[in-house]
Structure formats: structure tokens, C-alpha cells
Amino acid sequence: MRRASPRAPIAALFLLCLSATGFAEGFDVSRDDVRQFVDTMARRHRFDREELTALLASAQAQPKILEAIQRPAEKSLAWWEYRQRFITPDRIEGGVQVWRRNADVLARIAAQSGVPAEYLIAITGVETLYGRNTGRYRVLDSLATLGFDYPPRAEFFRKELEQFLMMAREEQLNPREPMGSYAGAMGIPQFMPSSFRRFAIDGSGDGHRNLWEEGPDVFASVGNYLREHGWRAGQPVLAEAYHANAPDDPASAKLVLGDSVESLRGRGYVFQTTLPDRNRAMLVPAQLADSLTWRVGFENFYAITRYNRSALYAMAVHDLAQEIAARYRALPSP
């Protein structure tokens, strides 16, 4: 991704590539909400009004984004269906190859963050298939479209647009270039701009945080995100549980650490862990094609659900990580 010269005025970034986009096709910058946004950015963050107005005028409203965000959610998948989507030979082998290409970097970042390499890799495998599917919309267009033309969540997306513009200024990026999802999630780990500014890390030491290219910045940022959300080094993520006649209703399961190792065992669940009885835990239903199984999630499982608030997502990351680790460690020594 192209960066401006460090000597160039930061505000000049917003004048790049104007010739590629006609003002008439962009947002109506005379709108009250757009003018208010520009005023806020100028007062609060010292953005140049004229340059920011020109930038927003060049943003392209995307009807397909509005269609996508309003599209009815797909039917809820059972765990076995969800697992089939993400625990695939392609994702497992892809994760092994990522590990082989970045072994030294991953070892260093795993030691620093406390998050094992296989989980750093698996997050990116589930999110974007290791960078193959990072999104096809300009982040500027996505956030402007949703921030100004989608009233149900306009406030949220305008805040993300604010964070994006500040991120572009800090990282010396042309704000017209970053690509992402229709909701504005960016790069290999799919960080929203607010998460980028708060959790992304310069893992390479080059003074920038590059989440669009495989490398130390991506892995360090994922590790930092998990650590900041409660990851505990050396502790397990999940345990398989057994109960002959489980008393819990799977429909009542919540993404909260509302149980403990002791309380779950007290209700008759059998599972293996070296964690102390008082350690917080949650019961996780895992529906197979022909039966209901149970798993016990610990604090590191909960940390993964802060990345994406879904037990299915967190189980997919865990299972993919385990498959990648098993395959990688079975490789012959170089």
C-alpha cells in the first residue's frame, strides 16, 4: 500500500488521486450531516476543512453495501455445519504453510503475547483464508455509505470513519486506498478502524502497522488483541465434556464465564483440565449431525469470542488451530 513521504504535509494525503474520481459521483457535501462531520473533525482533530470536504466528495456511495447490511441473516448453522465450512484441508494446509514461512516471527510473537502460534494463524485463517479474502470495497466508501446513508447504525459507522481518517493520517496512508469488507473491516485480521488504532502493533519495527500483508504486524496485532481481551498464557481454550443426561438447555447457553470448573463438575459434567476448581468456565453446546455434545470453554475461549461474539466462531478457531499444530509438528525437521 502506497505511503506518503514522511516529509510531505499529512493533510496532503487527502488530495491524492482526486483526478481519478469526479466530485459529482461522490457524496453531497452540502448535507448537514456531512458538514457537521467535517466540522467535528476540524475542531476535534485539526483536519483541514477544505481537504476533508474534498475527500468526502470523492467517496462513492455503494448501494450494494446497503443491500448487504440489510440482507436477512442466513439461517443459524449447527456446529457440525459451521465446522465443515472452516475446518477444511485447504485451511489446514494453508495454515501450515503460513507457519513455515513465518516460523521465527511466530515464535517471537507467541513468546511476547502468550498466544500460541497456531491460534495467531487460525484467526487469520477463519477471518480471510490467510489474506485471500480481505474484502473488495474501499474502506472510505464503506464507512461513508454506512455512516451517512444507513440511519439505523449511522452513529457507529461515522465514529469508525472518524477513526479511519485518524488511522490514515497516523500511518501516512492514502485514505482512498485501503480495501476491506462492506462494513469497513480491514486487512488479513479484519480489524475495524477503532480496533486498528487501539490494538494493532508494529511487529516489524518499521514504524508502521501493516495489516494488509502477511507478516509480523498481523500476528503481533492478533496476539495483542487477544491478550488485551483476557488471554492467559499457558492456559487451555476448550475441553470436551461428557454427561449421560445433561441437565442444561443448549438454547440457554450464553457467552459468559458464568460457571466454574467446580460448578460444572458438580452438575455431573466430566472433563479433563488442570485448572483449579475456582477457574471460571462456560458450558458450550456443540451440535453434531446425529447427537448433541458439550464442551467447556475457559478464559481463553472467552477471549476469542471478543474477536467475534460467537461460540461457533471460537470453536472453529480452536479446532483449526489444533489441526494446524498437529500437521505442522508432524512435518520432518528441516
Image (spheres, helix red, strand yellow):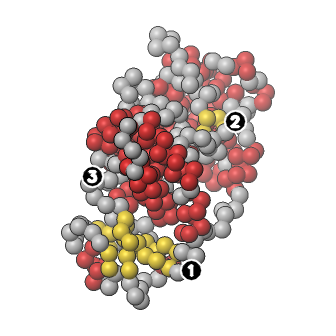
Lower sequence index among marks 2 and 1: 2
Amino acid type, residue under disc 1 in the picture: Asp
Q: Position of residue 128 (x, y in %)?
A: 56, 45
Of residue 62 and residue 45, the one placed in the foreground of this image is: 62
**Of the numbered discs in the image, which one, if any, rests on residue 233?**
3
Of residue 212 and residue 291, the one placed in the foreground of this image is: 291
**Badge 3: how crowded within 10 Å, few (<14), some, or many (20+)?**
some
- Name the residue tied to disc 2: 31
- Name the residue tied to disc 1: 290
Distance between the Cα atoms at labels 2 and 1?
56 Å
Lower sequence index among marks 3 and 1: 3
**Badge 2: how crowded within 10 Å, few (<14), some, or many (20+)?**
few
* Residue at x-position 51% and y-position 32%: 213
Residue 143 shown left or right of residue 171 in the figure: right
Quarter holding the N terminus?
Answer: top right
Where 47 sits versus 89, above or below?
above
